[in-house]
Image (tube, helix red, strand yellow):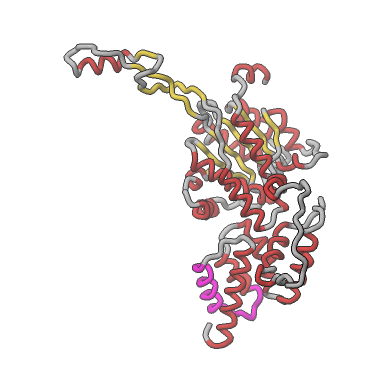
Amino acid sequence: MSGAGGGTLAANVMHFARLLRRAGLPVGPAALLAAEQALSLIDIGNRAQLRTALRTTMIHRHEQREVFDQAFALFWRDPEAARQAAAMALLEGQKEPDPARKRSGSRRVAEAFVSPRERPAPREDAEPPRLDAALTVSARERLAQLDFEAMSAAEIAAAKAEIRRLAMPLDARRTRRLRPDPTGPQSDLRATLRASLRQGGEILGLARRRRVVRPPPLVVLCDISGSMARYAQILLHFLHAVANERERVHVFLFGTRLSNISRQLRHRDPEAAFQLVAHIVPDWSGGTRIGESLAAFNTKWSRRVLAQGAIVLLVTDGLDREGAVGLAENMDRLHRSARRLIWLNPLLRWDGFEPKSQGVRAMLPHVDEFRPVHNLASLRGLIDLLSRAPPPMNARMRSA
């Protein structure tokens, strides 16, 4: 990396790292130094080796590959053509969203190419801006209704900030555990006798206690297959905030296998937590085996985490590559083990959604709630649902 050529290449790598950061990828100085060191060990004339070296040093998560590949194809080909493509992409972004829209990675990279410094300055002789007092939808309301899959890099960052401010006041329930309380409604004779031993057998007062009231456990089973990768990426920020705010939150990811990430999400730093998750989840953006994943959960984890009226959130689109083999049986067992089973499906954002696939038809009879999860408004609706008092367990079992 020495000489004029090396200096030019180092500057290009630095500009490429800035482009990735504007597109929403966490590329820091350590990744930049690693990339420059990797380029000094390969043949930079080989495009495949160049892309592999940069990708292995600058990104560390499976869902970042799409944005990286789009940025690499534009930046290392023709910068002028890339700016023209970015301008065309921004013009297309001003139009009404098309149901058959392109992948969001292309839009994020196109917006990243247009730096704020490159925007033309306003002319001095231009007319002063006019204030429009018409009643329009605010940017916050528009963000709440925008689909996660259609968001740009800036909109995703704003959505993550909104998600961190969401609070989930789960309905608190009385447990079987008792705790000492001087004003409690129940007398504790055992504690009273123990206290009297310290006074020579003299009873000076009655010890009292009351039942512990706490929110029920929350268990989340989230699909991370290719069709759910973007939604799972946003929902992980929501689950990370919930796991750090309250106790007894258990999160499982499944694609072709089941992975427990509850311990990793308890890390306070979101980026550090997601790095730990990426190291233990090998099947991100792969296929989907819902039946096998639920069978593994029912066998290994249900007795450990489904206790004291646990609430289960199942986040998936219901598209099973195995043709719903064993799915109905495992859904029925999961439904009977939990107090409430809520299915969150991003496909419900479409008005004409119909349960036609085998997986959806097998799962639908065994859920208590069937709700969409595709934008911030749907997350707020989920929080409102969880804050209500659940139906009695006996009534639910009779209806089942």
Query: Residue 280: within the magenta?
Result: no
Q: Position of residue 90 (x, y in %)?
A: 76, 63
Task: Out of 124 and 155, give the one closest to the viewer.
Answer: 124
Q: Position of residue 104 (x, y in %)?
A: 72, 57
Query: Relative to 76, is 146 above or below?
Result: above
Task: Out of 241 and 260, give the one closest to the viewer.
Answer: 241
Residue 236 relative to residue 355: left or right: left
Residue 362 picture quarter: top right
Q: Identify the residue at horizontal 52%, vertical 27% (top origin).
A: 172
Query: Residue 46: within the magenta?
Result: yes
For the magenta stretch, what is the residue range?
29-48
Q: Identify the residue at horizontal 56%, vertical 76% (top origin).
A: 39
Name the magenta segment's main secondary structure: helix
Question: Where the C terminus falls, by quadrant?
Answer: top right
Tell me if I can see residue 336 in this picture.
yes
Residue 292 picture quarter: top right
Task: Out of 75 and 182, give the one closest to the viewer.
Answer: 182
Task: Out of 338 and 162, give the one closest to the viewer.
Answer: 162
Q: Identify the residue at horizontal 76%, vertical 47% (top origin).
A: 136
